Image: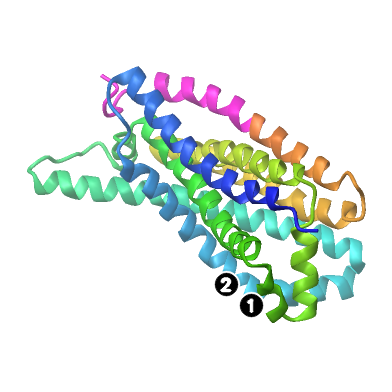
Amino acid sequence: MLNPWLILGPSGMIIVGIFSMLFWRERVKRESGKSVPLKFFIFGGLLWAAAIVPKIIMDYTVTQPLYVLWASSFGAFGAILLLGVYVGLRTGIFECGAAYLGFRAFARNAGKASEAHGVRDSSGEGAAVQNIAYREAVAVGVGFGAFEAIVLALPSLVQMVAIFLDPSILSSLPPGQVSAIESQLSQPTWMAAAAVWERAFAILAHVFATVLAYLAAAHRRLLLLGGAVAYKSVLDATIPILQATLASSPYYVVVTEAFVAVMGLIGLLGMLNMDRIALSSTNNIRNEE
């Protein structure tokens, strides 16, 4: 029996993504009288796309051969651990690296634009990055996580709407695929809530890591970039390990979503601390006057 309430999962993910951007725009407008320009949210989405492309390429080329090699050399459990480390480091390096390089590229373009208007900045690229207001750097992180939530949810939403409106579509698919889809769409309704829950906390994690990358670029402190990479790596490395070790357990989803929530809350606490650091150590932040 297909459960139509599961459509709340992908639709809720999209709502969370859109709401997070609207929330940050409204909060900034209430505090400063100005809304964050939409270009910073879009910039975050572009950074996410830039980070995801090499990961997809790796999955189609080297991930499976590496896993087979690890399994033959270290056994099933060893391969799972190595896969977790591989997935985690890959995510941390590509996503945080994309944010760091993106902020530096943004600063270079802003500097060229200033020079074109007769304004020369001799204070260096780090100071140019600081010309991105802290609240705008947060918007980049929000856009990073929001675009991920929306893009991941859209295919599932389209598939669910099509099947629930016309279940006969399943009859044209191979039996194995039909079985997988029916199993997925027959899950309890609370699974939809779990998907929304995960995206909400994942956005917090993306914002924290992105802000660390911003501060690393603004203050030329690669230790902060290393912290962002480590944080993202721990978050993504643990997921495949939990999937493999708890896949047959009824508590798998609960444990996984609890872990994501803990990491998201760590990101939120870090954000509150980073907010004070940025506002106290940066003297040339645009629009903070």
| Label number found at residue 93 | none
Say if residue 84 shows up in the picture: yes
Numbered tag placed on residue 61 in the rendering: 1
Residue located at (82% from left, 55% from top) = 243
Question: What percent of the width, then of the height, locates residue 93?
Answer: 57, 54
- The reply, left or right, for residue 84 in relation to residue 225 is right
**Marks 2 and 1 in Cβ contact (< 8 Å):** yes
Q: Would you call the spot at circle 2 few (<14 residues within 10 Å), some (14-19), or many (20 or more)? A: few
In the foreground, 145 or 12: 12
Q: Up-down: is 230 above or below 276?
A: below
Quick check: is 272 in the magenta stretch?
A: yes
Amino acid type indicated by mark 1 = Thr
* Circle 1 crowding by C-alpha within 10 Å: few under 14, some 14–19, many from 20: few
Quarter-wise, where is residue 231 in the image? top right
Residue in the image at 45% along x and 47% along y: 100
Task: Identify the main secondary structure in magenta.
Answer: helix
SS for dot 2: helix
Q: CA distance from mark 2 to mark 1?
A: 6 Å
The residue that disc 2 covers is: 57
Coloring applied to the structure: rainbow
Left-right relation of 133 to 141: left
Please say if 137 is above or below 180: above
User: The magenta stretch spans which residues?
Assistant: 266-289
Q: Taking 183 as reference, is 15 left or right?
A: left
| Residue nearer the viewer, 232 or 122 | 232
- Residue 30 x/y as whole percent: 35, 19
Instruction: State the residue in front, 119 or 17.
Output: 17
The N terminus, quarter of image: bottom right
Helix, strand or loop status at disc 1? helix
Please state if 176 lies on the left or on the right of 161 as rendered.
right
